[in-house]
Structure formats: C-alpha cells, structure tokens
Image (cartoon, rainbow, N blue to C red):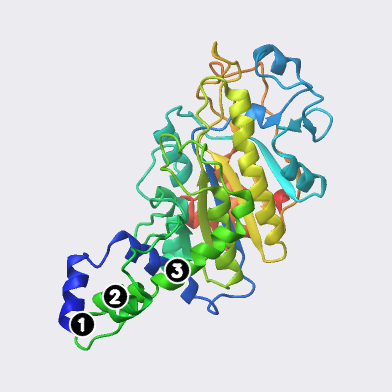
Amino acid sequence: MDALTRRRFLIASGVTGGAALAAYSLRDVLATAGDRDPAAKTLVLVTLYGGNDGLNTVIPYADPAYAAARPGMAYDPAEILDLDGSAGLNPGLSGLHRLYQQDKLAIVRGVGYPRPNRSHFASMDIWQTAQPERPGTTGWVGRWLDTAGRDPRLAISFEPALPPLLAGAESAGATVPGGVLTLPGKVTPELLGGLGAAEPGESPAVARAAACFADLVRVRDLMDQVGADTADDEDDGDTPPATATGGAAPPLDRQLALVAKCIEAGAATRVYSVSLGGFDLHADGKDAQRSLLTKLDGPLTAFAERMAGRGVVVAVYSEFGRRVRANASDGTDHGTASDMFLLGDGVRGGLHGEQPSLTDLDDGDLKFTVDFRDVYATLLAEVLGTDPERVLDGWTGRIPELF
C-alpha cells in the first residue's frame, strides 16, 4: 500500500475508530508485560448494576422478620447455603459458598453511606466517586491513578464505556471493549500490515494509531482464544443489560477471562473493572435474581481459583440494596445498605460487619453499619499499597481484620 493511500485511509477512518481504539488499548496493556513489580497486587472490581437485593443474597434466615417481610420471596432454610447457623448464601452461590467454607471469601454486611440516595445514577456516582456528601467529577480509582503515575494502562475496564470510577483529575484509565472482534471479509493480514507500517515524517499520534491496525489480527486471535476458553460456559443470551448506570457489557465470564489473560501475561495493570447488570428486579425477583447470581458465581469462582497465588483481590458491590419488605409484585424496590464480597489472596474469610436490624429501619430501609469508604480505604492500603487519606479526602476508617 502506497503512503498516500495509507494516509488517506487513516484520516478517513478518523484514526480513532472504535476497533482501532480497542486494539490500541489492549495492545498497550499487553505491551506492559515485564514492567510489573513482582510484589504488586491486583484489584478486580465487579459492579452489579441495578441494585442487587442483599437480603436474598446473604440471607438472615434465622430472623423471623425476614420471612414475615417477604412471604412470597423468602427462601426456605433448607434451600439456603448456611454460613453460621443464622445466615446463609443464596442457593445460586454454591461456588462462593465453597470458598467461604475454605476461609477464602469475606462477606461485609450492612455496607452503605450516610443519607442514602435511592436513584441508580446518583447512588452509583456516590459509590464510584467515594464522595457521599457531594459527588465530584473524579472516581476513587481515578484519583489513585493520579498518584500512581497517571498511566491509563494501570487501571482498565472491559466494559463498553469508561466508568466514572476510573476518571481522575489529571488522568483516566483505559477501556478495552471485550466483545468478539470480527474483521471485514476483504481485510487481510497483509492489508493490515501495510496500514500499520511506519512512514517517515508522520506525527507520533498517527504512527501509534496506525500501528494498531497491524495488531488487529493479534487482538482477534486473543479474543478468539478467550472465546474458546469460555465456550462451555457461554452466556445464554438472556442476561438483561445493566440497568440505569451501566451499558450492555460482554458476558462476565468473557470479561474475567480477558482479565486473567492480562494478569497471566504479566501486564502492569493494577486495577480492572468488570460488571454484570440486570439486578433492578421490581417484579418476580426471587427466581430472576437467583439466575443472575448463578451467572456471577460460576465465572467469579473459576476466576478466583485460576488467579490463586498471583496477588489478586476481587471486590463485588452494587449501588444499593433493596427494601426489606417485598412489594405487591413479589419484587423489591430501591433500598439502601447491602453486602460486599471480597475474595482472593490475603483476604481473611468470614462474616465482617454487623447485620442491620430488620425491624429498626430508616423509612422501611436498612440502616448501614459499615461505611463503604472503610472498605475502599482497606483495599487502597492493603492491595494498592497507597495512603487512603490522599485518595478518599482524608478518610481515616479501616477494616483491618479483612486482611
């Protein structure tokens, strides 16, 4: 391909087309292999969009108020995966229950923040900025990134759009869409190689953008390999898109498989963001939530076992829990406090935090017993090795027993 044709093509394609950006981002992430500090840990954040029902996730079945508040949604104690004789996990979480029995899963109960907001958008902004009083324009991971070198490859998302979580004041993480990459029929490896060849006199930005065309075949092969790795567990296509605050992401098993590939390749990335949506279940919520939790459980358990010994810690959260009392449609409406899951190397398994009362309520909702910034501060200190006060506006809370 002559230089003029190549240059016109790059300009006509905008240089920053979606496929090019996807290739460039993944190329850059994998290019950091070998730059990583062997002692550095990795944080994987799993966002459950839509407001997961915490009371039917970690179920306080021994409290009679549970069944009384949810006559059509309460689980029979015989179905529940027991934790401590008074609470248990949803039947869809058998893999996480096994990890709990091995002291590899920490469950933090009653997590929330003061003056809770029941809007999906507003509450997710609060969780991702870690600024309950007045959410700003930067995410807590983005502010960490500002202090950690400002390299976008240190914090990446396999979601369709960059979550506010990864936006800093002076830098931002990278988004690497994790779907299947299909090349047009007439696009050959030779053509892509010609587009990616360096040309004298071009700007660094054009040269870097052009190089990603040459990497599309490599990226496609990596995506195909991830697809083969997850073929047996492929999503059935019925998973609802993320509600309100999250776009339609690839299946969770594919996202986590890409994370695993990057970690195994030795990428320098320290934080990964993945998501699962569909938890806004205002009607017929019991069976639908169990199905979604099953789609969380399998990939998450497999990922945790695959990553054992690699310094990887996973944190699972949602923007809020649900109301204690079921509604007339056997669903639940927007609530407040809920549970967080932590698992991975160094995590001390067990139940942490105090279970909120089911009868002493705040306008029908649970009163939080653990501020989520305590969890974030612990992750910043123990996993990312930084001073949490610099990132969390001077917050000093911790949960040291988690590690």
Up/down of 332 relative to 40, above or below = above
Up/down of 208 relative to 234, above or below = below
Q: Are marks 3 and 1 in contact (CB under 8 Å)?
A: no
Can you say which quadrant of the picture contains the C terminus? bottom right
In the rendering, which numbered label is found on residue 210?
A: 2
| Secondary element at image label 3 | helix
> In x, y percent, where is residue 173?
41, 60
User: Which residue is tagged 3?
Assistant: 219
User: Which residue is tagged 1?
Assistant: 202
Q: Residue 364 versus residue 94: which sits nearer the camera?
A: 94
Q: Are marks 2 and 1 in contact (CB under 8 Å)?
A: yes
Type of amino acid at the residue the image marks with label 2: Ala
Q: CA distance from mark 2 to mark 3?
A: 15 Å
Up/down of 230 relative to 318, above or below = below
Q: Are marks 2 and 3 in contact (CB under 8 Å)?
A: no
Quarter of the view holding residue 27: bottom left
Type of amino acid at the residue the image marks with label 1: Glu
Res 396 seen here: no
Q: CA distance from mark 3 to mark 1?
A: 24 Å
**Horizontally, is 390 left or right of 56 in the view?**
left
Going from the N terminus, do you reach mark 2 or mark 3 first? 2
Looking at the image, is mark 2 or mark 1 nearer the viewer? 2
Up/down of 36 relative to 46, above or below = below
Q: Residue 76 versus residue 147: which sits nearer the camera?
A: 76
In the rendering, which numbered label is found on residue 246?
A: none
